[in-house]
Amino acid sequence: MRLAIKFFFLLVLTFQSFPSLAQETITAEEQRAAANLSAKFLEQWEADGKMRRVVSELYAPDFIERFIAQEKSALREEAPTASIMFLPGMHYQSDLLTTASTEDWRSFYVAAHGVFFSFATIAINQTAGPLLQGKEPDADQIDKMIERLIPASVRGELAQDPVLGNLVNDGADSATIANIEDLRRVTALLERTLEAIKHERGDNSFKLTQVAHKLLAKLTLTGTDKPVVEIHDEPFLGLPAGTRVVCVPIFEMFHLMFAKVDGEYRILCVHPLAD
């Protein structure tokens, strides 16, 4: 997972976006929706760094049920205990899609993305100034930034956790989340980690600096952050085949994926740009 975090830092440094599966011409309505949803996402996140509120106000109400159904559909040809990546460096056993409750999944989603979005916020805040001046941190500086991401108050607990230990131990193997007890333990530890980050860094853990906003504005002007449209040949996240799904980069590290749900544009999921 440390490698995943390092990769996210490199995405910021290189202003890199990854191509969509299929790119269609985006409509003016979709452009407005992309601008509106990404702005609201940042506004909600920067208010207090509470991912659950972001999910409640901007995501499709049944987004986690759609996620579970999509993952099950993708597993039809796989073994029932296949290991699936949830986020880079974080995997779970596929039978959890059946055994864990929707609330367990929702809590896990909120906790995991809250920590990753906090890392993303800190990464952009720390690198925006040098990047706007044309200076890029070297590998040693990036390693030091990553080392400082984890507060001392939770470092020991993370180091001993078989799933999350690779946040602290560079190169350590990460165990798969194997059962409901693992899922709930990891969720609780991620929640404590985010609270420790907020306690240590204050607003800097979820609020972008003015310089960071200037960097994101520059990326928008240069077209690096332009939204794209995907059209899937098969049903996707509870949507019928052929539905237009809009993807817009957020934090230079993730894609917000959204579409019309009951006549209103709502976020369906967030994917790392490398996914």
Image: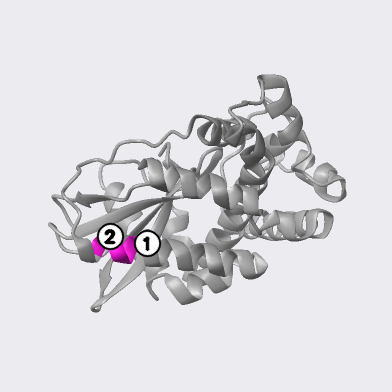
Residue at 49%, 64% (x, y): give it: 41
In percent of width and height, residue 246 lies at: 28, 56
In percent of width and height, residue 223 lies at: 35, 42
Residue at 34%, 47% (x, y): give it: 226
Q: Quarter of the image holding residue 48?
A: bottom right
Above or below — where is 55 with respect to 233?
below
The amino acid on which the numbered mark 2 sits, given as a three-letter code, is: Gln
Q: Which residues are magenta?
A: 30-35
In percent of width and height, residue 112 lies at: 59, 54
The amino acid on which the numbered mark 1 sits, given as a three-letter code, is: Ala
Nearest the camera: 21 or 48?
48
Q: Estimate how packed mark 2 is, as few (under 14), some (14 to 19) or many (20 or more) residues with alpha carbons within 10 Å.
A: some
**For the stretch drawn in magenta, what is the main secondary structure?**
helix
In percent of width and height, residue 137 lies at: 66, 26
In the picture of the structure, the residue carrying the numbered disc 2 is 31
The reply to whether callout 2 and callout 1 are in contact (CB within 8 Å) is yes
Q: Marks 2 and 1, Cα distance to the nearest angstrom?
A: 6 Å
Using the rendered image of the protein, determine whether residue 272 is visible from the camera's viewpoint.
Answer: no
Q: Is residue 194 left or right of residue 58?
A: right
Q: Estimate how packed mark 1 is, as few (under 14), some (14 to 19) or many (20 or more) residues with alpha carbons within 10 Å.
A: some
Looking at the figure, which quarter contains the C terminus?
top left
